[in-house]
Amino acid sequence: MKALDRSLIIASFAAVLAAPAPAAPPASTNWQPTWISPAQPAWGADGVLPLGMPAWLGDVTLRQSLRSSLGGRRVRLVVSNEYGSEPLRLGAMALRATSAGDGAGPPVRPVRFQGREGALVAAGARVLSDPVDLPVHAGDRLEVDLHLPEPTALAGFHWDAQEHTQILRGNAVGRPRAEPLQTVTTRAFVSELWVEASLAPASVVAIGDSITDGNGSSLGRDQRWPDHLSRRLASSGIAVLNAGIAGNRLLRGGWGESALARFERDVLGRPGVRAVVVLLGTNDIGLPGSPFAPTEQPVSLDELTRGFLQLAQQAHSRHVRVIVGTVPPFEHALAGTPLEGHYSPAKDALRRALNDWIRGARAFDGTVDFDAVLRDPRHPAQLDPALDSGDHLHPGDAGYERMAAAIDLEALLGAPVEEGAR
């Protein structure tokens, strides 16, 4: 090779080495579900309990609150018309953080869909909003306004919200001092909050009945056991999603589809789900023969155990860990009310047999003994009075906090976990 050629090659290599490195590709955007409110079918006027919200809504604004289990740079909302039989017309929407603590008053951010105000949601479908520039932190509470400009049948419905929903006249979106026509404790339409995060999604889902949904806890204070578990996991960047539905059962529908029927939608279909905590059986055992299901035959232990094993098999096939809780005691449940009939000695015997099976089953990644946590040591068929909400079926705030504290985080996630709020 000639000296000139060699010089040219060396110079070429030098130029390549001296050139600036190509720009790094932009960081990928990860959207993390951080709060959910699973939809259930609304019932008619012949239901045992009232809906808690008008079956039809027209030219009103729904103002609803929620708590984000994780923080992020931007947020998105999911609006549900699930179980609706007609298209849903959305009007204006807005979102604000009510616990940002900036001292200047929370800013209101419009929520849009493909850049426009409002959207049309097909019957049975859901829509995802555009990103909203509203940074949130773990534990922030948000308020969502949704205007329904046309007569609208109730859908995307969730009965036991443990929150106050205000129904405001006309388009009151973003008006903080609007006078409510009615205040209820039922949710509708707004069903999920997502946050934009730098890490891939990671979440734990709690599936269960009204005890997971938080019945008996303080309204608007985020005292459900999944709320307390969320605070334990916040510093680890793991969202806790509450898929509890009041009245839900493992095997049979009624108040919402059975847990087996909705397991894919509400648990396994979530992006980044790492584990599920299952607390079911109270209503499978308690509802037959009660005012809620007066003609139903009792469920058997074999049917219940097969149902739990099916949930575990489905979860493990998707590499999702399963923690199962024992069923808390419920002697005297709803005593003295028109709904009395949840408890009997035979039902309690089945509950205790199921709990013994759960404690000894090897099909799960772990168990949490909610029965032992909540029962009265002197009367094991009853809730501890200090942990009882007062109806002898649902814990109160102190009981829910005890439940969350009893969950072994390493068993839940299969690895040591940093605990504590951010």
Image (spheres, grey):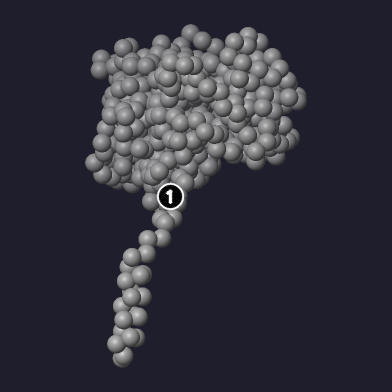
In front: 59, or 102?
102
Q: Is residue 378 visible?
A: yes
**The C terminus appears in which quarter of the rendering?**
top left
Q: Vertical placement of 144 versus 316: above or below?
A: above
Question: What residue did someone put label 1 on?
Answer: 27
Inspect the image, locate mark 1, and give the three-letter code of the amino acid beneath it.
Answer: Ala
Residue 83 spot, x, y in % from top left = 65, 35
Q: Quadrant of residue 308?
A: top left
Residue 136 spot, x, y in % from top left = 44, 29
Q: For the point 61% across and 20% down, which residue is it?
A: 174
In front: 153, or 384?
153
Left or right, 193 with respect to 60, comes to left
Single out the residue that lies furthest toward the front: 4
Left or right, 65 with respect to 14, comes to right
Residue 173 spot, x, y in % from top left = 63, 21
**The N terminus appears in which quarter of the rendering?**
bottom left
Residue 56 spot, x, y in % from top left = 71, 22
Left or right, 178 with respect to 205, comes to right
State the SS at label 1: loop
Q: For the point 32% across and 68% down, which residue is it?
A: 17
Mark 1 nearby-residue class (10 Å; few <14, some 14–19, many ≥20):
few
Q: For the point 40% across and 13% down, which residue is it?
A: 389
